[in-house]
Protein backbone atom coordinates (compact mmCIF):
# COMPACT_ATOMS: atom_id res chain seq x y z
CA UNK A 1 0.00 0.00 0.00
CA UNK A 2 1.01 3.62 -0.39
CA UNK A 3 2.78 5.15 2.56
CA UNK A 4 0.79 7.67 4.52
CA UNK A 5 3.12 10.43 3.30
CA UNK A 6 1.92 9.79 -0.24
CA UNK A 7 -1.71 10.22 0.74
CA UNK A 8 -3.12 13.71 0.71
CA UNK A 9 -5.50 15.01 3.37
CA UNK A 10 -8.14 17.15 1.73
CA UNK A 11 -8.32 19.40 4.80
CA UNK A 12 -4.67 20.35 4.26
CA UNK A 13 -5.38 21.16 0.62
CA UNK A 14 -7.79 23.97 1.45
CA UNK A 15 -11.32 24.73 0.22
CA UNK A 16 -10.46 25.84 -3.36
CA UNK A 17 -8.50 22.66 -4.10
CA UNK A 18 -11.16 20.51 -2.47
CA UNK A 19 -13.76 22.09 -4.76
CA UNK A 20 -11.62 21.35 -7.83
CA UNK A 21 -11.18 17.76 -6.69
CA UNK A 22 -14.95 17.52 -6.23
CA UNK A 23 -15.47 18.71 -9.80
CA UNK A 24 -13.02 16.04 -10.95
CA UNK A 25 -15.06 13.31 -9.25
CA UNK A 26 -18.20 14.80 -10.80
CA UNK A 27 -16.74 14.47 -14.30
CA UNK A 28 -15.44 10.97 -13.55
CA UNK A 29 -18.92 9.67 -12.80
CA UNK A 30 -20.87 11.84 -15.24
CA UNK A 31 -20.40 9.88 -18.45
CA UNK A 32 -21.53 6.51 -17.10
CA UNK A 33 -24.22 7.99 -14.84
CA UNK A 34 -26.04 9.80 -17.65
CA UNK A 35 -25.54 6.91 -20.06
CA UNK A 36 -28.04 4.73 -18.16
CA UNK A 37 -30.96 7.15 -18.54
CA UNK A 38 -30.00 7.73 -22.16
CA UNK A 39 -30.16 3.97 -22.78
CA UNK A 40 -33.36 3.36 -20.82
CA UNK A 41 -35.37 6.52 -21.47
CA UNK A 42 -35.26 7.79 -17.88
CA UNK A 43 -34.64 11.46 -17.12
CA UNK A 44 -31.02 12.71 -17.02
CA UNK A 45 -31.64 15.53 -14.52
CA UNK A 46 -33.50 13.26 -12.09
CA UNK A 47 -30.63 10.79 -12.43
CA UNK A 48 -28.09 13.46 -11.45
CA UNK A 49 -30.26 14.62 -8.55
CA UNK A 50 -30.54 11.21 -6.95
CA UNK A 51 -26.96 10.25 -7.67
CA UNK A 52 -26.06 13.19 -5.45
CA UNK A 53 -28.75 12.54 -2.84
CA UNK A 54 -27.99 8.81 -2.82
CA UNK A 55 -24.29 9.49 -2.27
CA UNK A 56 -25.00 11.78 0.69
CA UNK A 57 -27.42 9.25 2.20
CA UNK A 58 -24.78 6.53 1.77
CA UNK A 59 -22.16 8.66 3.53
CA UNK A 60 -24.55 9.39 6.40
CA UNK A 61 -25.36 5.71 6.92
CA UNK A 62 -21.67 4.74 6.71
CA UNK A 63 -20.68 7.32 9.36
CA UNK A 64 -19.17 9.69 6.76
CA UNK A 65 -16.12 7.40 6.45
CA UNK A 66 -16.33 5.64 3.05
CA UNK A 67 -15.12 7.67 0.01
CA UNK A 68 -17.61 6.18 -2.44
CA UNK A 69 -19.75 7.88 -5.07
CA UNK A 70 -23.06 6.28 -6.05
CA UNK A 71 -24.07 6.57 -9.69
CA UNK A 72 -26.39 4.78 -12.10
CA UNK A 73 -26.20 0.99 -12.09
CA UNK A 74 -25.94 -0.85 -15.41
CA UNK A 75 -27.02 -4.15 -13.85
CA UNK A 76 -30.74 -3.37 -14.24
CA UNK A 77 -30.62 -2.42 -17.94
CA UNK A 78 -32.04 -5.78 -18.98
CA UNK A 79 -34.81 -5.43 -16.42
CA UNK A 80 -35.78 -1.96 -17.63
CA UNK A 81 -35.81 -3.15 -21.24
CA UNK A 82 -37.92 -6.27 -20.60
CA UNK A 83 -40.48 -4.44 -18.44
CA UNK A 84 -40.73 -1.55 -20.93
CA UNK A 85 -41.34 -4.03 -23.75
CA UNK A 86 -43.94 -5.87 -21.67
CA UNK A 87 -45.72 -2.65 -20.69
CA UNK A 88 -45.81 -1.27 -24.23
CA UNK A 89 -47.20 -4.59 -25.49
CA UNK A 90 -50.07 -4.10 -23.03
CA UNK A 91 -50.84 -0.64 -24.37
CA UNK A 92 -48.91 1.50 -21.90
CA UNK A 93 -46.75 4.45 -22.87
CA UNK A 94 -42.98 3.98 -22.58
CA UNK A 95 -42.91 6.47 -19.70
CA UNK A 96 -45.52 4.56 -17.68
CA UNK A 97 -43.87 1.22 -18.50
CA UNK A 98 -40.61 2.59 -17.12
CA UNK A 99 -42.48 3.67 -13.97
CA UNK A 100 -43.43 0.02 -13.45
CA UNK A 101 -39.80 -0.95 -13.91
CA UNK A 102 -38.82 1.61 -11.27
CA UNK A 103 -41.28 -0.04 -8.87
CA UNK A 104 -39.50 -3.36 -9.38
CA UNK A 105 -36.09 -1.74 -8.80
CA UNK A 106 -37.36 -0.06 -5.62
CA UNK A 107 -38.43 -3.46 -4.31
CA UNK A 108 -35.06 -4.90 -5.34
CA UNK A 109 -33.44 -2.31 -3.11
CA UNK A 110 -35.20 -3.92 -0.14
CA UNK A 111 -33.10 -7.08 -0.61
CA UNK A 112 -30.04 -5.05 0.39
CA UNK A 113 -31.62 -4.63 3.81
CA UNK A 114 -32.12 -8.39 4.11
CA UNK A 115 -28.47 -9.08 3.34
CA UNK A 116 -27.38 -6.30 5.68
CA UNK A 117 -29.48 -7.81 8.48
CA UNK A 118 -27.91 -11.25 7.92
CA UNK A 119 -24.42 -9.76 8.09
CA UNK A 120 -25.30 -7.82 11.22
CA UNK A 121 -26.75 -10.96 12.85
CA UNK A 122 -24.07 -13.50 11.92
CA UNK A 123 -21.06 -11.21 11.63
CA UNK A 124 -19.11 -10.00 8.65
CA UNK A 125 -16.40 -12.66 9.06
CA UNK A 126 -18.82 -15.53 8.47
CA UNK A 127 -20.07 -13.83 5.32
CA UNK A 128 -16.61 -12.83 4.08
CA UNK A 129 -15.31 -16.38 4.30
CA UNK A 130 -17.17 -16.82 1.02
CA UNK A 131 -15.31 -13.82 -0.45
CA UNK A 132 -11.56 -14.54 -0.03
CA UNK A 133 -8.96 -12.70 -2.17
CA UNK A 134 -8.95 -15.52 -4.75
CA UNK A 135 -12.58 -14.57 -5.46
CA UNK A 136 -12.63 -10.81 -4.90
CA UNK A 137 -9.32 -10.12 -6.68
CA UNK A 138 -10.46 -11.55 -10.04
CA UNK A 139 -13.89 -9.94 -9.61
CA UNK A 140 -12.29 -6.52 -9.20
CA UNK A 141 -10.03 -7.22 -12.21
CA UNK A 142 -13.10 -8.23 -14.21
CA UNK A 143 -14.96 -5.04 -13.28
CA UNK A 144 -12.30 -2.95 -15.00
CA UNK A 145 -11.98 -5.27 -18.00
CA UNK A 146 -15.74 -5.48 -18.56
CA UNK A 147 -16.01 -1.69 -18.51
CA UNK A 148 -13.06 -1.29 -20.89
CA UNK A 149 -15.10 -2.11 -23.98
CA UNK A 150 -17.24 1.00 -23.60
CA UNK A 151 -14.09 3.12 -23.21
CA UNK A 152 -12.62 1.73 -26.44
CA UNK A 153 -15.91 2.26 -28.28
CA UNK A 154 -15.90 5.91 -27.20
CA UNK A 155 -12.24 6.35 -28.14
CA UNK A 156 -12.91 5.03 -31.64
CA UNK A 157 -15.17 8.00 -32.38
CA UNK A 158 -12.07 10.23 -32.45
CA UNK A 159 -8.74 8.74 -31.46
CA UNK A 160 -6.99 12.13 -31.58
CA UNK A 161 -9.19 13.55 -28.80
CA UNK A 162 -8.94 10.31 -26.83
CA UNK A 163 -5.14 10.29 -27.01
CA UNK A 164 -5.02 13.96 -25.98
CA UNK A 165 -7.05 13.21 -22.86
CA UNK A 166 -4.92 10.13 -22.07
CA UNK A 167 -1.62 11.99 -22.51
CA UNK A 168 -2.87 14.92 -20.42
CA UNK A 169 -3.91 12.63 -17.56
CA UNK A 170 -0.60 10.72 -17.57
CA UNK A 171 1.58 13.84 -17.92
CA UNK A 172 -0.31 15.70 -15.17
CA UNK A 173 -0.10 12.74 -12.81
CA UNK A 174 3.61 12.00 -13.34
CA UNK A 175 5.19 15.39 -13.96
CA UNK A 176 2.60 17.78 -12.53
CA UNK A 177 3.29 19.81 -9.41
CA UNK A 178 0.91 20.94 -6.67
CA UNK A 179 -2.75 21.06 -7.67
CA UNK A 180 -1.91 19.90 -11.22
CA UNK A 181 -0.74 16.54 -9.88
CA UNK A 182 -4.01 15.78 -8.07
CA UNK A 183 -6.52 16.78 -10.77
CA UNK A 184 -5.21 14.85 -13.80
CA UNK A 185 -8.64 13.49 -14.77
CA UNK A 186 -10.29 16.91 -14.74
CA UNK A 187 -7.43 18.37 -16.78
CA UNK A 188 -7.69 15.53 -19.27
CA UNK A 189 -11.38 16.28 -19.77
CA UNK A 190 -10.91 20.06 -20.05
CA UNK A 191 -7.94 19.99 -22.44
CA UNK A 192 -9.54 17.44 -24.77
CA UNK A 193 -12.92 19.24 -24.69
CA UNK A 194 -11.37 22.64 -25.47
CA UNK A 195 -9.33 21.25 -28.35
CA UNK A 196 -12.44 19.50 -29.69
CA UNK A 197 -14.31 22.81 -29.61
CA UNK A 198 -11.44 24.57 -31.39
CA UNK A 199 -11.44 21.88 -34.09
CA UNK A 200 -15.18 22.30 -34.64
CA UNK A 201 -15.98 18.83 -33.28
CA UNK A 202 -18.69 20.12 -30.89
CA UNK A 203 -22.06 21.51 -31.96
CA UNK A 204 -23.13 23.98 -29.25
CA UNK A 205 -26.43 24.96 -30.91
CA UNK A 206 -28.61 22.86 -28.52
CA UNK A 207 -27.36 25.04 -25.62
CA UNK A 208 -29.55 27.95 -26.72
CA UNK A 209 -32.66 25.81 -26.35
CA UNK A 210 -31.83 24.57 -22.84
CA UNK A 211 -33.16 26.52 -19.82
CA UNK A 212 -30.93 27.78 -17.02
CA UNK A 213 -33.23 26.53 -14.27
CA UNK A 214 -35.73 23.70 -14.11
CA UNK A 215 -37.29 21.36 -11.53
CA UNK A 216 -36.28 17.81 -12.49
CA UNK A 217 -39.00 15.73 -10.79
CA UNK A 218 -42.33 15.16 -12.54
CA UNK A 219 -45.20 13.11 -11.10
CA UNK A 220 -45.80 11.15 -14.30
CA UNK A 221 -42.22 9.86 -14.13
CA UNK A 222 -42.47 8.50 -10.56
CA UNK A 223 -43.98 5.29 -9.22
CA UNK A 224 -47.02 7.30 -8.08
CA UNK A 225 -48.16 6.95 -11.69
CA UNK A 226 -48.05 3.16 -11.26
CA UNK A 227 -50.51 3.17 -8.37
CA UNK A 228 -52.80 5.52 -10.26
CA UNK A 229 -52.76 3.10 -13.20
CA UNK A 230 -53.39 0.19 -10.84
CA UNK A 231 -52.41 -2.79 -13.02
CA UNK A 232 -51.71 -5.23 -10.17
CA UNK A 233 -50.80 -8.10 -12.49
CA UNK A 234 -48.11 -6.05 -14.18
CA UNK A 235 -46.89 -4.87 -10.78
CA UNK A 236 -46.34 -8.44 -9.60
CA UNK A 237 -44.74 -9.50 -12.88
CA UNK A 238 -42.37 -6.53 -12.75
CA UNK A 239 -41.34 -7.17 -9.15
CA UNK A 240 -40.70 -10.87 -9.79
CA UNK A 241 -38.69 -10.07 -12.91
CA UNK A 242 -36.46 -7.36 -11.43
CA UNK A 243 -35.99 -8.19 -7.74
CA UNK A 244 -33.63 -11.16 -8.29
CA UNK A 245 -31.18 -8.87 -10.09
CA UNK A 246 -30.39 -7.42 -6.66
CA UNK A 247 -28.51 -10.60 -5.72
CA UNK A 248 -26.09 -9.84 -8.54
CA UNK A 249 -25.71 -6.17 -7.63
CA UNK A 250 -25.12 -7.09 -3.98
CA UNK A 251 -22.19 -9.23 -5.07
CA UNK A 252 -20.89 -6.39 -7.21
CA UNK A 253 -21.24 -4.07 -4.21
CA UNK A 254 -19.08 -6.37 -2.09
CA UNK A 255 -16.46 -6.45 -4.85
CA UNK A 256 -16.50 -2.65 -5.04
CA UNK A 257 -16.06 -2.40 -1.27
CA UNK A 258 -12.99 -4.63 -1.51
CA UNK A 259 -11.65 -2.40 -4.30
CA UNK A 260 -12.21 0.81 -2.31
CA UNK A 261 -10.75 -0.76 0.84
CA UNK A 262 -7.67 -1.91 -1.05
CA UNK A 263 -7.26 1.49 -2.70
CA UNK A 264 -7.60 3.50 0.51
CA UNK A 265 -5.84 1.01 2.78
CA UNK A 266 -8.70 0.74 5.27
CA UNK A 267 -10.99 -2.22 5.94
CA UNK A 268 -14.38 -0.64 5.32
CA UNK A 269 -16.04 -4.07 5.40
CA UNK A 270 -15.32 -4.18 9.14
CA UNK A 271 -15.62 -0.48 9.99
CA UNK A 272 -18.10 1.06 9.43
CA UNK A 273 -19.16 -2.41 8.29
CA UNK A 274 -20.49 -4.17 5.22
CA UNK A 275 -24.00 -4.10 6.71
CA UNK A 276 -23.88 -0.30 6.72
CA UNK A 277 -22.53 0.04 3.16
CA UNK A 278 -25.19 -2.37 1.88
CA UNK A 279 -27.91 -0.48 3.74
CA UNK A 280 -26.69 2.81 2.29
CA UNK A 281 -26.66 1.39 -1.23
CA UNK A 282 -30.12 -0.13 -0.73
CA UNK A 283 -31.66 3.10 0.57
CA UNK A 284 -30.11 5.09 -2.29
CA UNK A 285 -31.44 2.63 -4.87
CA UNK A 286 -34.95 2.47 -3.40
CA UNK A 287 -35.33 6.24 -3.03
CA UNK A 288 -33.95 6.96 -6.50
CA UNK A 289 -36.33 4.46 -8.09
CA UNK A 290 -39.37 5.89 -6.31
CA UNK A 291 -38.75 9.23 -8.04
CA UNK A 292 -37.96 7.77 -11.46
CA UNK A 293 -34.16 7.63 -11.37
CA UNK A 294 -32.04 4.53 -12.12
CA UNK A 295 -30.78 2.21 -9.40
CA UNK A 296 -27.62 3.44 -7.71
CA UNK A 297 -24.36 1.61 -7.14
CA UNK A 298 -20.86 2.39 -5.90
CA UNK A 299 -18.80 3.70 -8.82
CA UNK A 300 -15.54 2.18 -9.99
CA UNK A 301 -14.71 5.34 -11.97
CA UNK A 302 -14.41 7.31 -8.74
CA UNK A 303 -12.37 4.53 -7.16
CA UNK A 304 -9.99 4.96 -10.08
CA UNK A 305 -9.75 8.69 -9.31
CA UNK A 306 -8.98 7.90 -5.66
CA UNK A 307 -6.20 5.56 -6.73
CA UNK A 308 -4.78 8.15 -9.11
CA UNK A 309 -4.88 11.24 -6.85
CA UNK A 310 -4.29 9.61 -3.43
CA UNK A 311 -6.84 12.02 -1.95
CA UNK A 312 -9.09 9.71 0.07
CA UNK A 313 -11.00 12.23 2.18
CA UNK A 314 -14.76 11.46 1.79
CA UNK A 315 -15.48 15.20 1.95
CA UNK A 316 -14.27 15.49 -1.64
CA UNK A 317 -16.84 12.91 -2.74
CA UNK A 318 -19.56 14.78 -0.87
CA UNK A 319 -18.62 17.97 -2.69
CA UNK A 320 -19.14 16.12 -5.98
CA UNK A 321 -22.52 14.87 -4.70
CA UNK A 322 -23.63 18.41 -3.81
CA UNK A 323 -22.51 19.67 -7.22
CA UNK A 324 -24.53 16.90 -8.90
CA UNK A 325 -27.63 17.98 -6.95
CA UNK A 326 -27.15 21.65 -7.89
CA UNK A 327 -26.55 20.84 -11.54
CA UNK A 328 -29.68 18.68 -11.66
CA UNK A 329 -31.63 21.96 -11.53
CA UNK A 330 -29.67 23.42 -14.47
CA UNK A 331 -30.69 21.83 -17.79
CA UNK A 332 -28.20 24.05 -19.63
CA UNK A 333 -25.24 22.55 -17.78
CA UNK A 334 -26.52 19.03 -18.33
CA UNK A 335 -26.74 19.87 -22.01
CA UNK A 336 -23.20 21.29 -22.04
CA UNK A 337 -21.74 18.15 -20.50
CA UNK A 338 -23.79 15.89 -22.74
CA UNK A 339 -22.25 17.68 -25.73
CA UNK A 340 -18.79 16.61 -24.59
CA UNK A 341 -17.22 14.37 -27.26
CA UNK A 342 -17.49 10.67 -26.50
CA UNK A 343 -13.78 10.30 -27.28
CA UNK A 344 -12.88 12.69 -24.45
CA UNK A 345 -14.77 10.57 -21.94
CA UNK A 346 -13.40 7.41 -23.58
CA UNK A 347 -9.76 8.42 -23.13
CA UNK A 348 -10.20 9.25 -19.45
CA UNK A 349 -12.31 6.14 -18.84
CA UNK A 350 -9.67 3.94 -20.46
CA UNK A 351 -7.21 4.92 -17.73
CA UNK A 352 -9.70 4.75 -14.87
CA UNK A 353 -11.01 1.31 -15.86
CA UNK A 354 -7.47 0.02 -16.20
CA UNK A 355 -6.64 1.26 -12.72
CA UNK A 356 -9.63 -0.63 -11.31
CA UNK A 357 -8.22 -3.86 -12.74
CA UNK A 358 -4.80 -2.93 -11.40
CA UNK A 359 -6.30 -2.70 -7.90
CA UNK A 360 -7.55 -6.27 -8.29
CA UNK A 361 -4.10 -7.46 -9.36
CA UNK A 362 -2.56 -5.66 -6.40
CA UNK A 363 -5.07 -7.37 -4.10
CA UNK A 364 -3.94 -10.80 -5.33
CA UNK A 365 -0.28 -9.88 -4.88
CA UNK A 366 -0.61 -8.29 -1.45
CA UNK A 367 -2.74 -11.13 -0.11
CA UNK A 368 -0.21 -13.62 -1.56
CA UNK A 369 -2.83 -15.74 -3.32
CA UNK A 370 -1.21 -19.02 -4.36
CA UNK A 371 -1.84 -19.29 -8.10
CA UNK A 372 0.29 -22.40 -8.26
CA UNK A 373 -2.69 -24.15 -6.69
CA UNK A 374 -4.94 -25.68 -9.36
CA UNK A 375 -7.93 -24.99 -7.16
CA UNK A 376 -7.23 -21.26 -7.04
CA UNK A 377 -6.46 -21.12 -10.75
CA UNK A 378 -9.82 -22.72 -11.58
CA UNK A 379 -11.69 -20.20 -9.42
CA UNK A 380 -9.85 -17.16 -10.79
CA UNK A 381 -9.92 -18.38 -14.39
CA UNK A 382 -13.66 -19.02 -14.49
CA UNK A 383 -14.44 -15.66 -12.91
CA UNK A 384 -12.41 -13.81 -15.53
CA UNK A 385 -13.55 -15.86 -18.53
CA UNK A 386 -17.24 -15.77 -17.62
CA UNK A 387 -17.28 -12.04 -16.85
CA UNK A 388 -15.54 -11.09 -20.08
CA UNK A 389 -17.01 -13.84 -22.25
CA UNK A 390 -20.64 -13.10 -21.42
CA UNK A 391 -20.06 -9.36 -21.80
CA UNK A 392 -18.56 -9.59 -25.29
CA UNK A 393 -19.88 -12.94 -26.49
CA UNK A 394 -23.50 -12.89 -25.34
CA UNK A 395 -24.46 -9.22 -25.76
CA UNK A 396 -23.90 -8.15 -22.15
CA UNK A 397 -26.08 -10.67 -20.32
CA UNK A 398 -27.75 -14.07 -20.28
CA UNK A 399 -31.50 -14.39 -19.87
CA UNK A 400 -32.86 -17.01 -17.50
CA UNK A 401 -36.59 -16.65 -17.99
CA UNK A 402 -37.44 -13.01 -17.25
CA UNK A 403 -34.19 -12.52 -15.31
CA UNK A 404 -31.16 -11.05 -17.06
CA UNK A 405 -27.81 -11.72 -15.40
CA UNK A 406 -24.69 -9.79 -16.40
CA UNK A 407 -21.45 -11.62 -17.05
CA UNK A 408 -20.01 -10.10 -13.90
CA UNK A 409 -22.93 -11.38 -11.84
CA UNK A 410 -22.63 -14.88 -13.29
CA UNK A 411 -18.87 -14.86 -12.74
CA UNK A 412 -19.31 -13.79 -9.12
CA UNK A 413 -21.91 -16.49 -8.45
CA UNK A 414 -19.78 -19.22 -10.03
CA UNK A 415 -16.61 -18.04 -8.28
CA UNK A 416 -18.23 -17.93 -4.86
CA UNK A 417 -19.86 -21.33 -5.38
CA UNK A 418 -16.66 -23.02 -6.60
CA UNK A 419 -14.62 -21.56 -3.77
CA UNK A 420 -17.18 -22.83 -1.27
CA UNK A 421 -17.38 -26.43 -2.53
CA UNK A 422 -13.84 -27.13 -3.77
CA UNK A 423 -11.62 -28.70 -1.09
CA UNK A 424 -8.78 -26.71 0.42
CA UNK A 425 -5.52 -28.43 1.35
CA UNK A 426 -5.22 -29.29 5.02
CA UNK A 427 -3.58 -26.51 6.98
CA UNK A 428 -4.11 -23.87 4.29
CA UNK A 429 -5.25 -20.55 5.66
CA UNK A 430 -7.34 -17.84 4.03
CA UNK A 431 -6.06 -14.31 4.58
CA UNK A 432 -8.38 -11.54 5.56
CA UNK A 433 -8.15 -8.04 4.08
CA UNK A 434 -5.61 -6.92 6.68
CA UNK A 435 -3.41 -9.93 6.05
CA UNK A 436 -4.22 -11.77 9.29
CA UNK A 437 -4.73 -15.48 8.87
CA UNK A 438 -8.02 -17.08 9.69
CA UNK A 439 -9.45 -20.49 9.13
Image (spheres, rainbow, N blue to C red):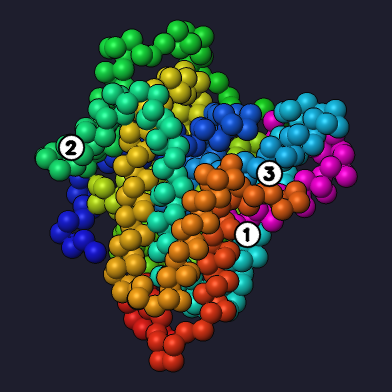
Distance between the alpha carbons at the discs numbered 3 and 1: 13 Å
Q: Is residue 423 above or below residue 291?
A: below
Q: Earlier in the sequence, mark 3 or mark 2?
A: 3
Q: Does any portion of residue 241 appear in the rendered image? A: no
The dot on residue 247 is 1
CB atoms at circles 1 and 2 under 8 Å apart?
no
Residue drawn at point x = 51 percent, y = 54 percent = 387
Residue 238 highlighted magenta (yes or no): yes
Q: In the shown orientation, is residue 305 left or right of residue 8?
A: right
CB atoms at circles 3 and 2 under 8 Å apart?
no
Residue drawn at point x = 49 percent, y = 37 percent = 33
Range of residues picked out in magenta = 221-249
Residue 246 highlighted magenta (yes or no): yes
**Residue where numbered disc 2 is placed:** 172
Task: Tell me residue 49's x, y (percent).
Answer: 53, 35
The dot on residue 79 is 3
Q: Does any portion of residue 382 appear in the rendered image? A: yes
Distance between the alpha carbons at the discs numbered 1 and 2: 40 Å
Amino acid sequence: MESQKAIYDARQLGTPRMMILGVQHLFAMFGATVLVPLLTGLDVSVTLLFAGIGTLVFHFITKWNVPAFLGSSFAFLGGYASVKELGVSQGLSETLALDYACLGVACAGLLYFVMAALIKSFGVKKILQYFPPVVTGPIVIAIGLVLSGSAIANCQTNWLLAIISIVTVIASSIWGKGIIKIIPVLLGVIVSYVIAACLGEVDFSPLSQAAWLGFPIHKEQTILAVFEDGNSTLMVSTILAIMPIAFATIMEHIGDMFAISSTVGKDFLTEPGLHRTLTGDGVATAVASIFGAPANTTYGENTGVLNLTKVFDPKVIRIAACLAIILAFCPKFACLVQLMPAATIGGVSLILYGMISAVGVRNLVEEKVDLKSSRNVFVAALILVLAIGVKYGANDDIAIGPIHLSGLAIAAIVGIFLNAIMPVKLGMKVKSFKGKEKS
